[in-house]
Image: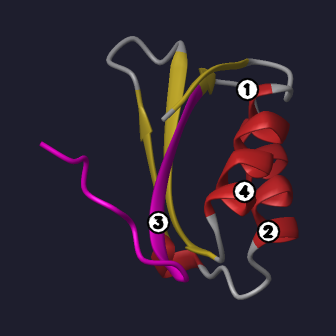
Amino acid sequence: MDAPTIQFPCDYPIKVIGDATPEFTTQILDVMLKYDSSLCADKVRERASRKGNYQAITVLFWAMSADHVQRMFVELKACPGVRLVL
């Protein structure tokens, strides 16, 4: 069975999980804005872990291509405090 193909450009959800620090959200959104300048608050959701040690940010961004997504993943993973990018 073939894997489903993604038709680009499209809205693409990205989840970033990392250490809950005051600058975490800002640094993640700064990277995301480089790849989607139309990003707005209604496309961003934040959630703290039960004990407050970690933060999850889910962003629906406009992806132009698979390469566009891959480059952003690499940059997000290089951010301090990021534990996982999905």
The answer to whether 61 is drawn above or below residue 25 in the figure is below
Query: Which kind of residue does numbered mark 4 sit on?
Result: Asp
x and y percentages locating residue 10 in the rendered image: 48, 80
Say which of marks 2 and 1 sits in front.
2
Determine contact: label 4, label 1, CB under 8 Å.
no
- Which residue is drawn at the image coordinates 48% and 35% (left, top)? 86
First of labels 2, 1 by sequence position: 1
x and y percentages locating residue 83 in the rendered image: 62, 16
Q: Secondary structure at mark 1?
A: loop
For label 2, the residue is 35
Q: Residues within 10 Å of mark 4 (few under 14, many from 20)?
A: few
- In space, the residues marked 3 and 1 are separated at their CA atoms by 25 Å
- In space, the residues marked 2 and 3 are separated at their CA atoms by 12 Å
For label 3, the residue is 12
For label 1, the residue is 21
- In space, the residues marked 4 and 2 are separated at their CA atoms by 11 Å
- In space, the residues marked 2 and 1 are separated at their CA atoms by 23 Å
Q: Residues within 10 Å of mark 3 (few under 14, many from 20)?
A: some
First of labels 4, 1 by sequence position: 1
Which residue is at the front of the view, 13 or 63?
A: 63
Q: Secondary structure at mark 3?
A: strand
- Which residue is drawn at the image coordinates 71% and 88% (left, top)? 38
- Which residue is drawn at the image coordinates 53% and 19% (left, top)? 54
Query: Which kind of residue does numbered mark 3 sit on?
Result: Tyr
Determine contact: label 2, label 1, CB under 8 Å.
no
Quarter of the image for residue 31 reads bottom right
First of labels 2, 3 by sequence position: 3
x and y percentages locating residue 80 in the rendered image: 86, 21
Residue 67: give its label: 4
* Residue 11 relative to residue 17: left or right: left
